[in-house]
Image (tube, helix red, strand yellow):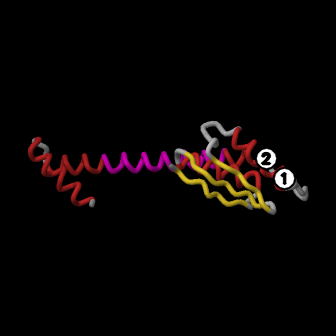
Amino acid sequence: MKHSVVVLCLAFAVGCGMSEDEVRQKAGDTAVAGKRAVDTAAAAMKNAYDHAAEVGKEYAVKAGEAIDDATLKGKVVAAMKLIDGLDSSAVSIEVKDGMAIASGTVKTEKERMMVEGVLYGVTGGKYKNEVVVR
């Protein structure tokens, strides 16, 4: 794939008066810019997850405190509503025997990661995230 892009760039550059070295430099610059964009997006998703987990931890069960399923569900739902940038209106939370299960849809992978962060933060790891991006 990379070679075909270079060949296409070379073919285009010949018609534009660019040398082969100039075309290679432009292709390299484009590849570096693409990698930076991917790295930035990955960092933003990790930060969103971490933030959601921290908010979820604020609502987590204290050590040794037993709560019922309805209370756990309420904590997860409340925590999701506090996350800026998370539209959880199409996300459902069910809790059975202390296991929180999120299902439904969100618009972005970042929002899906936020839901997962809340689930982890509130439950301490006893959850399933079945939310999908649509």
Which residue is at 90% across, 56% downward? 65
How packed is label 2: few (under 14 Cα within 10 Å), some, or many (20 or more)? Answer: many
Q: Which residues are magenta?
A: 30-51
Q: Which amino acid does the dot numbered 1 rest on?
A: Val
Q: Position of residue 25 (x, y in %)?
A: 24, 48
Residue 34 magenta-highlighted = yes
Residue situated in front as seen by the camera: 106 or 11: 106
Q: Residue at x 21, y 59 (%)?
A: 4
Task: Count neighbours of disc 1 (C-alpha within 10 A) and say few if under 14, some if 14 to 19, many if 20 or more.
Answer: some
Where is mark 1, residue-wise?
Answer: 61
- Estimate the x, y position of residue 113 in percent, counting from the top left: 60, 51
Q: Is residue 96 above or below residue 35?
A: below
The vertical placement of 99 against 71, above or below, is below
> Furthest-right residue in view?
65
Total marks placed = 2
Q: Secondary structure at mark 1?
A: loop
Q: Are marks 2 and 1 in contact (CB under 8 Å)?
A: yes
Earlier in the chain: of badge 2 and badge 1, it is 1
Q: Nearer the viewer, mark 2 or mark 1?
A: 2
Picture quarter with the N terminus: bottom left
x and y percent of residue 70 in the render?
82, 51
Q: What is the three-letter code of the residue carrying label 2?
A: Lys
Whether residue 21 appears in magenta in the rendering, the answer is: no
Classify residue 35 as left or right of residue 118: left
Q: CA distance from mark 2 to mark 1?
A: 9 Å
Identified at 90% across, 59% down, the residue is 64
Residue at image mark 2: 75
- Left or right of 38 on screen, residue 58: right
